[in-house]
Image: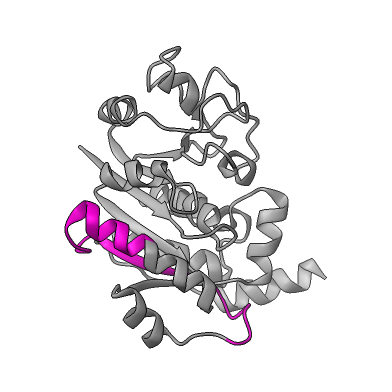
Amino acid sequence: MRKVISVVSGKGGVGKTATTSNLALALQELGEKVIAIDCDIAGSNLALHLDLHPNPERSLQSALEGRKNAIEAITLHSTGLMVMPSSHTIKDENIDRRKFKKILNRLDGIVLIDAPPGLNENLHTIIDLSDEVIVVTNPEIPAVADAIKIVEIVKEKKGGTENCWCVLAKVDEIKKQLNEGEIEMALELPIISRIPYDRELKKSIFDRVPVVRHSPYSSSAIEYRKLAAWLTNQSFEPPRYATVMRFLGKLRGR
């Protein structure tokens, strides 16, 4: 069986790719078969977050162009995660809907799509072919305003927002924040996760190791795991002594 979950945002820089990479690994830790696809052809970053060096012959483009089939286009990450990166060589910025659907039909498990930011035609294609949509935004007016536009596309493509939710990223980093009630009211979506932009998340992005592996006891890593459990209807218990382990980690990092 296959479930396609797209991770989308109305603008860049809100934490969409960090959410994709960490959620993929958190889902894998729960025993799920996960394939992460980078569909941000114009500004691919998923491979960078995972410290992968994309091979043009193992990429989304190679599958779309018919040089490889969907399975051959997958790269195996050191964690065991299956990744279909996007090549940095741009020939065509448009994703052919028919060809992309054919790729998805060859896959099984949870297919997690890192969608391009903005409101381009590729986003329409991705949302149309997704079973569930996660809208990543920040608690600030410009990000929420752009997220509203994404929700309108979901309504148009899906006839509603039954399988669409909001993940609030970079919580606490922005000093003057909208409150959660205001965001849920504006988007007409429930907030299912609140990811703090803690020091360990910043370090993990710099080190190109997702925070769920880089700093598993950090607040952000625990929130990503909680999100993965919610999406798969599994129970979640935070690691015992997480607060102590975070404190020890800070001492070692000094």
Residue 233 magenta: no
Q: Which quarter of the figure has residue 89?
A: top right
In this view, the residue farthest toward the top is 67
Residue 6 x/y as whole percent: 36, 49
Q: Magenta part of the protein: which range?
A: 150-176
Q: Residue at x 46, y 58 (%)?
A: 9
Residue 56 x/y as whole percent: 58, 21
Who is closer to the viewer here, 148 or 237? 148
Q: Residue at x 32, y 65 (%)?
A: 165
Number of numbered tags placed on the structure image: 0
Q: Is residue 180 visible?
A: yes
Q: Is residue 7 above or below residue 81?
A: below
Q: Is residue 228 visible?
A: no
In this view, the residue farthest toward the right is 254
Who is closer to the viewer here, 4 or 232? 4
Q: Residue at x 48, y 19 (%)?
A: 62
Name the image colouring. Answer: one colour
Q: Is residue 195 left or right of residue 107?
A: right
Residue 126 x/y as whole percent: 34, 43
Who is closer to the viewer here, 212 or 85? 85
Q: Is residue 188 above or below residue 175?
A: above
Residue 154 magenta: yes
Which corner quadrant holds the C terminus?
A: bottom right
Residue 220 x/y as whole percent: 54, 68
Which corner quadrant holds the N terminus?
A: top left
